């Protein structure tokens, strides 16, 4: 788990406190940029929430119209559906999404949330609700909020 806040750059038009995004990695246009190490300080495939925007610092960018600005981000808690028998507040789990190809299932995105990867060690922060028994795998699911 990455504790604390990270500093990075984001498009000026996207830089709003509270906004969340998934870092998708480096674009081809970034390979020769002098600011690449600051922009690429995030982990690919992870979800981040903007906590603060430094309005006084702007940099030109080949990708973002209006340039980029400095932001402070954190990894937010992530809602995820897990087997009800494992859903206890405060417990530590290793995230293992179900082996399921049912992308049309109502719970698919909750069982395979953006920002979590197989094998991530997480803490269950809170149990949110039981989910209807519509799981294609026949699992009894609970919605919980976790943090890596």
Image (cartoon, grey):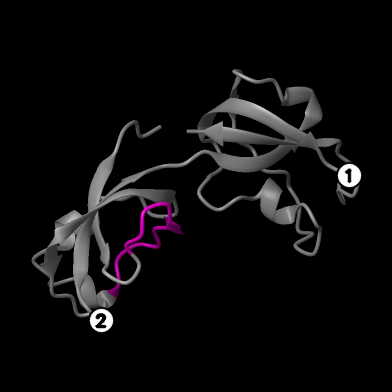
Depth order, front residue of 132/103: 132
Q: Say few, some or many: other residues with alpha carbon within 10 Å of mark 1 (under 14 / 14 to 19 / 20 or more).
A: few
Magenta residues?
A: 15-27
Residue at 64%, 27% in the rendered image: 126
Question: Based on the displayed image, in which of its 4 quarters is residue 109 positioned?
Answer: bottom right
Residue carrying label 1: 132
Depth order, front residue of 46/16: 16
Give the x, y percent position of residue 66.
22, 78
Give the x, y percent position of residue 25.
34, 62
Name the chief secondary structure element in magenta: loop
Indicate left or right for 49 with 38 as reference. right
Residue at 17%, 62% in the rendered image: 36
Residue carrying label 2: 65
Residue 36 vertical placement versus 41 (above, below)? below
Question: Based on the displayed image, in which of its 4 quarters is residue 74 positioned?
Answer: top left
Residue 91 vertical placement versus 124 (above, below)? above
Q: Report how many numbered discs are placed on residues in the image.
A: 2
Q: Going from the N terminus, do you reach mark 1 or mark 2 first? A: 2
Indicate left or right for 66 with 79 as reference. left
Q: Say few, some or many: other residues with alpha carbon within 10 Å of mark 2 (under 14 / 14 to 19 / 20 or more).
A: few
Is residue 21 magenta-colored?
A: yes
Label pair 1/2, CB-CB below 8 angstroms: no
As helix, strand or loop, the secondary structure at mark 2 comes to loop
Is residue 58 magenta-colored?
A: no
């Amino acid at each position: 788990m990455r504790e604390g806040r990270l500093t990075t750059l984001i498009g000026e038009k996207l830089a709003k406190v509270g906004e969340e995004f998934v870092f998708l990695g480096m674009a081809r246009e970034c390979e020769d940029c002098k600011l690449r190490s600051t922009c690429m300080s995030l982990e690919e495939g992870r979800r981040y929430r903007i906590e603060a925007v430094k309005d006084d610092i702007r940099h030109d960018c080949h990708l973002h119209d209006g340039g980029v600005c400095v932001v402070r981000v954190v990894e937010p808690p992530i809602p995820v559906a897990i087997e009800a028998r494992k859903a206890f507040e405060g417990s530590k789990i290793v995230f293992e999404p179900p082996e399921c190809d049912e992308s049309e299932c109502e719970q698919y995105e909750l069982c395979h949330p953006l920002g979590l990867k197989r094998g991530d060690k997480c803490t269950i922060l809170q149990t949110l609700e039981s989910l209807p028994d519509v799981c294609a795998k026949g699992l009894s699911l609970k919605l919980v909020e976790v943090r890596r």
